[in-house]
Image (spheres, rainbow, N blue to C red):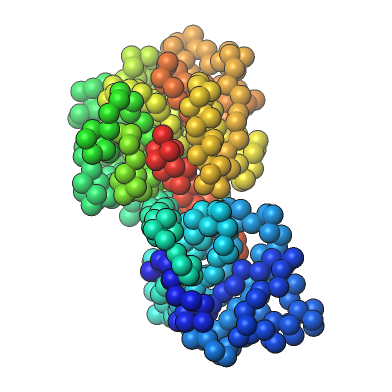
């Protein structure tokens, strides 16, 4: 779907549907439709409440085929996050063979640029459908061709805002595409190829470490997870360097868990909903999507992405509960549960990120069911060893309408990670499971400022919402891009 600005006066906008955002305390002032607007308000048919819509066909004196009043609720609550959902809801609700071009009027305000960005993002996120493998010939009949934000008298700042919205929306949809792929089509090797394609398209440097190279380096934790699968593992590395090298000594490292299918290994998961485990690589998808956006938005800080990609399978060579592996850092881990595999592959990736010169680390992973118990499907859990970096990550997420929640990471929880046979086990007790998982990762971040984002509850929506389709959400893409560009 094409997106952009339409700078024409309202009566000259050509569209199948010209949509006006209307608040509860406001009657829109459109001279050509004055009598009709008065009628729908006086009859009580429309009050500007959320998700209310009324349509005037062939509005007199206007080139648009339809004039739509769309309720947005209270003006005071219409922040960029609300704009994003509004636009997503709009494009999903108005799908029909007759509507191919939608134009949305945004109000004049000091935050108009933010609204333009959010509207474009929301439209792209809302129009997305995970139907790549459906063969229904009618599925394209309701596809939108274009979405424009109407901004008469717009300027370069609004043009940049629309471009930013397009980049972020498309990059988030890229992450959703990756995470929605079935595991027979998106193996670790295929995920590496997709990442290479993104890097090559934007001129990013990249490398893919294979099993032999990881064995030479000593990545025993990552290789231990992979050894039960016939699919070879890959450690994907992508480098963004600003023009002129970026200056300074700081380098941001983004690390994403890439388990393309997770059976649990020998500690086998129940069969119910195991099909969901194709999205155990949503952290990897978020990092690849973020790098797609970062390469286009061109922040001033260098960024390195690392994606450890594996399958966790119960093959004849699979690691066993009780095995001891030696990580890249030299620390040994007793594998008490082979279904706690994400923290093992991240341990080696975090150590490698530090070796590559990353001075600040942020990882994203569908790591624990415990975080879903704690926060449900609303908030991502955020853990850190550094208050300053955590503040930056939280601010970046808030600016992009992504909900992160600060979680504790005190020494009390570390007591659970003791083993008589190795430096530490890969699980603690059931109590505080998301926190002990984060503590495990903290051992490998060491003193490097680090934030861990447990996205197990926010990476996927089980049922479609008014503003977004069922499936992967692409959570963290916008937050990561904002973190880098605002550094």
Residue 130 seen in render: no
**Residue 141, percent across and down?**
44, 80
Residue name at image x 61 percent, y 68 percent: 21
Residue name at image x 40 percent, y 28 percent: 361
Position of residue 308 in the picture relative to residue 128 (left or right)? left
Question: Looking at the image, which residue sits at the far right?
Answer: 43
Q: Looking at the picture, does residue 306 appear above or below residue 297?
A: above
Residue closer to the observer: 377 or 2: 2
**Residue 93, percent across and down?**
58, 72
Position of residue 291 in the picture relative to residue 334 (left or right)? left
**Residue 364, percent across and down?**
45, 37
Residue closer to the observer: 75 or 133: 75
Residue closer to the observer: 447 or 223: 447
Image quarter in which the N terminus is found: bottom left
Image quarter in which the C terminus is found: top left
Q: Looking at the picture, does residue 24 appear above or below residue 19?
A: above
**Residue 220, percent across and down?**
32, 23
Asked which quadrant contains residue 71, the reply is bottom right
């Amino acid at each position: 779907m094409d997106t952009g600005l339409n700078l024409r006066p309202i009566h000259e906008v050509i569209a199948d549907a010209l949509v006006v955002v209307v608040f509860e305390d406001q009657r829109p002032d459109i001279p050509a439709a004055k009598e009709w607007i008065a009628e729908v308000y006086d009859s009580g048919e429309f009050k500007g409440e959320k998700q209310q819509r009324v349509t005037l066909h062939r509005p007199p004196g206007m080139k648009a085929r339809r004039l739509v009043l769309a309720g947005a609720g209270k003006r005071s609550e219409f922040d960029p996050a609300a704009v994003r959902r509004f636009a997503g809801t709009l494009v999903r609700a108005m799908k029909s063979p007759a509507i191919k071009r939608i134009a949305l009027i945004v109000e004049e305000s000091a935050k108009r640029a933010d609204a333009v960005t959010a509207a474009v993002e929301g439209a792209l996120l809302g129009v997305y459908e995970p139907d790549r493998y459906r063969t229904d010939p009618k599925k394209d009949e309701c596809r939108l061709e274009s979405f424009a934000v109407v901004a008469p008298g717009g300027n370069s700042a609004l043009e940049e805002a629309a471009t930013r919205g397009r980049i972020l929306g498309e990059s988030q949809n890229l992450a959703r595409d990756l995470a929605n792929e079935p595991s027979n089509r998106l193996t670790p090797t295929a995920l590496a190829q997709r990442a290479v394609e993104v890097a090559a398209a934007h001129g990013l440097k990249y490398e893919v470490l294979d099993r032999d190279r990881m064995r030479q380096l000593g990545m025993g934790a990552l290789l231990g997870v992979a050894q039960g699968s016939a699919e070879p593992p890959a450690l994907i590395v992508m480098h963004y360097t600003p023009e002129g090298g970026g200056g300074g000594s700081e380098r941001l490292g983004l690390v994403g868990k890439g388990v393309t299918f997770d059976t649990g290994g020998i500690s086998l998961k129940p069969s119910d909903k195991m099909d969901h485990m194709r999205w155990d690589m949503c952290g990897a998808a978020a990092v690849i999507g973020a790098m797609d956006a970062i390469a286009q938005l061109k922040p001033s800080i260098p960024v390195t992405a690392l994606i450890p990609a594996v399958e966790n399978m119960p093959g004849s060579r699979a690691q066993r509960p009780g095995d001891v592996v030696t990580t890249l850092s030299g620390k040994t881990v007793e594998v008490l549960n082979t279904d706690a595999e994400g923290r093992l592959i991240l341990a080696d990736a975090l150590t490698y990120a530090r070796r590559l010169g990353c001075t600040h680390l942020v990882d994203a992973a569908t790591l624990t069911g415990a975080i879903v118990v704690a926060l449900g499907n609303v908030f991502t859990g955020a853990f850190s060893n550094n208050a300053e970096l955590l503040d930056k990550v939280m601010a970046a997420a808030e600016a992009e309408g992504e909900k992160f929640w600060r979680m504790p990471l005190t020494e009390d929880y570390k007591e659970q990670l003791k083993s008589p046979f190795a430096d530490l086990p890969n699980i603690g007790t059931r109590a505080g499971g998301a926190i002990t998982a984060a503590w495990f990762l903290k051992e490998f971040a060491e003193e490097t400022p680090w934030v861990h984002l447990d996205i197990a509850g926010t990476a996927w929506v089980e049922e479609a919402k008014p503003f977004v389709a069922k499936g992967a959400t692409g959570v963290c893409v916008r937050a990561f891009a904002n973190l880098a560009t605002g550094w």
